[in-house]
Image: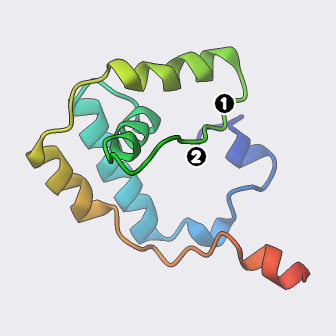
Amino acid sequence: MAAGSRGSRNGSLRREYLSAENVARARALNVVAGRGGQKLAQLTLSWALRDPRVTSVLIGASSVAQLEENLAALDGPPLTDDVLIEIDKHAVDGGIDLWARSRAAG
C-alpha cells in the first residue's frame, strides 16, 4: 500500500483484507494494467465501463490529479479478449465482506 494513500491513512482498507493471495492478485492485475500503459485504477474503471449494463461508476478521487488520472481510463486501450481472460484469472472472490462492519453496527 502506498505511503500516504487513503488506505494507509484512515483505516478504510482493513489489514485482514491484505491476505497474501489478495495482494498477489492485485499485483498481477497491476502488471496487466501496466502492459496496457494504464494504472490499476484505470484498468479497473475500463473493465467496469466495458459492460453495457453499467451506466456509471463511482470513483473516490481525493485530489484533482487522481480525478484526471481516473478520467484518463476513458482514453485507454480497448480491453481485448486476451486481456479480459487474464483479468478473469485474477479477479476472483477474495473473501472480502465490505459490509460486515455496517451489519455489525446494526
| Residue at image location 10% in from the left, 47% down from the top | 81
Label 1 Cα crowd, 10 Å radius (few <14 / some 14-19 / many 20+): few
- Residue 102: where, in percent of width, then height? 81, 74
User: Separation of disc 2 and disc 1 at Cα?
Assistant: 16 Å
Residue 63, by quadrant, is top right
Q: Quadrant of residue 64?
A: top right
Nearer to me, 72 or 51: 51
Q: Quadrant of the C terminus?
A: bottom right
Vertical placement of residue 34 versus 13, above or below: above
Label 2: element kind: loop
Q: Residue at image x 40%, y 46%? A: 48
Which residue in the structure is indicated by mark 1?
61
Is residue 34 found left or right of 70 in the rendered image? Answer: left
Q: Label 2 neighbourhood size at 10 Å, few (<14), some (14-19), many (20+)?
A: few
Measured as percent of width and height from the top left, residue 19 is found at: 50, 71
> Nearest the camera: 74 or 44?
74
Which color scheme did the rendering employ for the protein? rainbow
Where disc 1 sits, the SS reads loop
- Sequence order check: which comes first, mark 2 or mark 1? 2
Disc assigned to residue 89: none
Q: Is residue 42 above or below residue 16?
A: above
Q: Which residue is painted at 66% across and 66% down in the image?
A: 15
Instruction: Farthest residue to the right: give it.
Output: 106
54 relative to 31 in the view: left or right:
right
Relative to residue 57, is residue 6 drawn left or right? right
What residue is disc 2 on? 1
Q: Amino acid at mark 1?
A: Ala
Q: Please give the name of the residue rendered at 68% of the width and 37% of the height, measured from the top-left corner.
A: 5
Q: Is residue 100 above or below residue 9?
A: below
